[in-house]
Image (cartoon, helix red, strand yellow):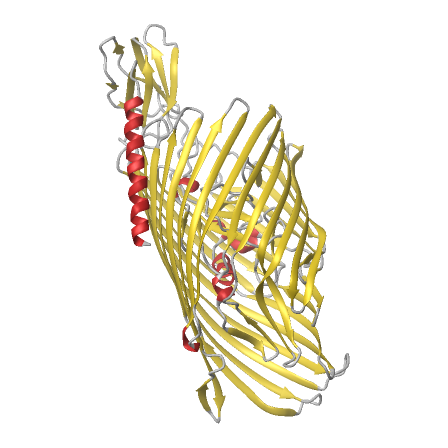
Amino acid sequence: MKTLYNILYTTLAVFALLQTSVAWAQVAKPNVQISGSVLDEKGNTMPFATIGLLKAKDSSLVKGAITTENGSYKFERVNQGSYIVRVNVMGYTKTNSKPINVNADATDIKVPVIKLSSSSKALKEVNITSNKPLIERKFDRTIMNVENSVLAAGNSALEILERAPGVTIDKDDNISLKGKQGVTVMLDGKLTYLSSAQLATLLRSTDGNTIQSIEIITNPSAKYDASGNSGIINIKLKKNKMAGTNGSLSLSGGLGTYFKSSESLSLNHKDGKVNIFGSYSHGNRERANNFQLNRLVDSATKTTYFTQHTFMGQKPYNNNYRFGIDYDITKKNTIGFLVNGYFNGEHNYNDNNTLIGDQPNVIQSHQYTYSQVDQSYTNFALNLNDKYQIDTAGQELSFDIDYSKFNNNNNAHYDTYFYTPAGVQQFPPAFIRNQSPSTITINTEKLDYAYPLTKTLKLEAGFKTSNVKTDNDLQAQLLKSGTWINDTSRTNRFVYNEQIIAGYFNLAKEFKKTSVQVGLRTEHTTSNGDLISRNGVPVIRKYLDLFPSLFINQTLSPKNEVSFSYSRRIDRPGYDDLNPFVFYLDQYTYSQGNPFLNPQYTHSFEFNYTYNKAINVTLSYSHTSDAITEIILTDTLAKSTHQTRLNLQSQNAYNINVYAPYTISKWWNGNVSLITYYINFKSNDLAGGNLDDGKAAFQLKTTQTFLLSKTFKAEVATNYQSPQTYGIYKIEQRYSADAGLSKSFMEKKLNIKFSVSDVFNTNRNRLSSRYQSVNFDLNQKNESRVGRLTLTYNFGNAKIKMRQHSTNSDEKNRVKGGN
């Protein structure tokens, strides 16, 4: 594989150099290029300044430009004549260069540095702000602008994500998009590459005050990794690009069942070619979770009824950090370095009461289990990136190298007591404990190349390698006669290695009213799952897949636009899904991974209609084979129920989605998102039966914003999820409403936000199953109604910018790694 990696790297590098040479050879120079740079009165570069090339004779405008982030500008293909360069920046005096003469023999001209001086009429401070809508629809994605939302303040990334259009989060923190699981979650364009449980922990520890926006991409192109059958969710963190030194400090307190607090600090310093940025956040968000599980187990001789009442208390704390530096080596080449990570922990305490009888409401025995679970999570990640703009036509080369390591430790104690209905001890208590340290190491390398073949034809190509290793060691003990002894039935060690080598190309063509993009991605996967302590046979897989994609966009009229897209995608099993360890709630209820899971493959088709760049209607269909699905199975002999994941034969999903923003008055606007879908699962042999089930369902989300004054606004969000069927589960309806107020002071430097999530405390999970020997009802209520007060103070330089600069995460950060 290393040889193949070198071949791919060399081939693409040579290809890039050849194309660069050809491009340079083809550039004609019939006219002259005029270039220069602009500085402020202190000698700092002046980005985003308005530049005009004027005729010296009458000051008529010939060409216009805006300085780059480095304060440079250029005018290409300038004809013969006499000119001046004029610089215009609000707060500074208009400044002209000396006359510039372009004659027949002139070569490229370098204008002396233009230095600005402050205008005597300049305001002490000017702030121009534009409020982006909370929900924004673009050609290939939906964007939730979190940064200024009242409802996002003080919440975690997981809580904010649940408010995004089409997103739902179930009782086990699995994320679904348009009713389908298999979502790929990215942070700043980087794949998290974590199990669902680890991902939930990471998102809970990410403070909402550090989030800029959430992007939802339902049908990604070949440039993205092929994982994620229902799409990609990219969480973009704030990165200030203002000149000088500035920052933001946020403090938040919340009260539900328990008190919660969070603090975050972000700093940015930009001076000339260097931009340094960093952030730190801390949080304590204790929460409560109550659920009741009623089960019926039929055996050959009798029926047993189980009624379980469980209280789960969770005391998590989190510390997240992020530090980076960008350096402009030249005007065309920027190199960046980023280090980030976290050190988090959690103390869980569970009270589980199980009532057992052979008739409904008749108790013959009572089992009580008290458990304490102490967990710690640490992550350290490094990223080195470089972006080189080869020419002004848009040819560029970029690379990313990532390294990330996760260390997770879990120490659990389970004390189980057995009683008669009268409360008399029936059997000696059982005491068990687990230690389950695990590590995940991720290495990725990525190279991307873009080459505009013509003004309307562009080629993108690249390759990527990723190497992932997980090592899970479960050490289980039983207490016998006062001594802890090894429990050989559960002690285990599972090591999983995975390597993916991928390459892709995209070819995009622009016509007058039509744009077309075709792409192909290939990924070669090698994986090895080894159950070391059981001397099991390793599960080794090698497979090569092709993932084509097609995008067509047609402008029918200035207000009407349609598009079609197709892509093939893959979902590889999560690490915790492959891990065969057994994790107990009590002796009758546990979860277990499945090392024999196969990847699932999805064909996705999507048709979009957009009216007036605002109202959007989407029709989509997807077919998934070997669908990885959570299943609860019952062992009638042991009378136990366990949760695992299996490959079902197929999943078919049909969606109709409508998104519409609206404005009722100058002070009242909002949006509505309606997602209607039908998901059907089929399996010819599941627990001895044939599954063929589905149900039409819908999700309705609305958000309303009230601008009560220039500095005072309110937001209200509502969410309704209809009853639905998912695999063997029947899931009941869910609904909730959130509300918040925001007030700014001190010329918007200080902001105070107050919000209440789930105002009426209605959000709960209720599901049931009646399939073969599976017969249960689950009712779960998390701590969802929480009032939060958040204070944010912005300090430092806040000079006006002609436009807001933002990094292109698709170009720069599309790599695998932990974040």
Pick the front one: 429 or 319: 429
Could you tell whether 427 is left or right of 466 in the image?
Answer: right
Q: Give residue 360's position: percent from left, percent from top.
A: 77, 79
Left or right: 537 with respect to 628? Answer: left
Q: Which of the pair 293/594 is nearer the observer?
A: 594
The quadrant of the picture occupied by the N terminus is bottom left
The image quarter containing residue 789 is bottom right
Left or right, 517 with reference to 297: left
Q: Which of 819 and 402 is in front in this view?
A: 402
Horizontal side of residue 118 vs 522, given as left or right = left
The residue at the point 65 percent across, 81 percent down is 637
Q: Which residue lies furthest to the top in this view?
A: 57
Q: Residue 495: where, in percent of width, then height?
A: 41, 68
Q: In which quarter of the image is residue 726?
A: bottom right
- Residue 155 appears in the picture as rendered: no
Q: Position of residue 652 (x, y in %)?
A: 64, 51
Number of numbered tags placed on the structure image: 0
Q: Up-down: is 418 above or below 268?
A: below
Q: In this view, does 570 lie above or below 37?
A: below
Quarter of the image with the C terminus in it: bottom left
Residue 362 seen in this snapshot: yes
Q: Where is residue 446 in the image (x, y as percent from the top left)?
A: 36, 46
